[in-house]
Image (spheres, rainbow, N blue to C red):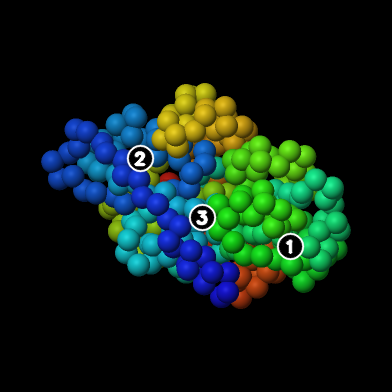
Amino acid sequence: MRSLRRALTAASAVSLLTLSVTACSDDGSTVRFGYISDYNGASLLAIAAKQGLWDKQGLTPEIKVFTNGPLQIQALGAGDLDFGYIGPGAMWLPASGKAKVVAVNTLAYADRVIGRPGVATMQDLKGKKVGVPEGTSGDMVLNLALKKAGMAPSDIEKVPMDPATVVSAFAAGQIDGAGIWYPLIDTIKQKVPGTVEIAGTKEFPDNSFPTAFVSGPNPDAELTDKVIKVLQEANDWRAAHPEESITEAAALLKLDPAKVKADAANVRTMTTADLVAKTEDGTVGTWLDSLADFFVGTGQLKSKPEPATYYTGDLYTKAYSK
């Protein structure tokens, strides 16, 4: 579909960062792992490296930074990645069979529809240019806000662009609004004082916005088990050390910890025990169903699949040890 094609053509925007880990095991199995430059995408990878969690599983991570989730799904399909990270706006891709969700990460509330000074409501954006990375959570919050306002996508001039271009185009006055997320919004506000937050994901309590780690559509069970164990242990360290997790993420991202802390304020973390319980009692399935209903409404999915067809909850619960 058009949104995916546009995302895939943006592959040149991907940059590479290799994380070297000392004292790796003799078999040294390399795991190529994608992420996005925010607290959600980077914190567990930063913690796993600092705490030596990859070593415990005999793995060597090679991490690559991407600008969005759809690009990582493409890289998984091409065999260029083993695992990646996606926000809720890209969950339609696993649901359509292009990847498997191996672990839920957080619930995220970082997405906003923003407008230039003087643009205060969705109605003020009618007929105006709104930049958005298509197929992402920025696109999702824009569609939700349009629906809530009784508007259709055709009521605005939607301009597909990658996240970095959204920032530069907004700053240059080339677009009047955007569907985008923190911490990029902080950068925009520095460039354009008076930027208005028109809508955000917290305004939609009937919807859930899980972020997740994904593999290709046919994951290797043994490798996936090891990777899930790394993520689970890092997740529990993050839950027990929230301030330190911000420091570790900031170091990996090379950002001011204050900016990462502001980003983390838009995140709900959970312990692994809680995520296992929510997997077993169907709560995670409800979250995924909520997103799938939305994607059916936008036409990104033809029908709503069963969560078990793309979330390997059995592997996640099996990997957990109390």
Picture coordinates of residue 135 (x, y %)? 58, 63
Residue 195 lies left or right of residue 58; in this view the side is right
Q: Is residue 313 visible?
A: no
Residue type indicated by callout 2: Val
**Mark 1 vs mark 2: which is more N-terminal?**
1
**Mark 3 vs mark 2: which is more N-terminal?**
3
Which residue is identified by label 3? 68
Q: Looking at the image, which residue is at 70% across and 48% down?
A: 112
1 or 2: mark nearer the eye: 1
Q: Looking at the image, which residue is at 27% across and 53% down?
A: 222
Q: Is residue 137 above or below residue 27?
A: below
The disc placed on residue 24 is none
Picture coordinates of residue 45 (x, y %)? 39, 39
Residue 122 lies left or right of residue 30; in this view the side is right
The quarter of the displayed image where residue 218 is located: bottom left
Which residue is identified by label 1? 129
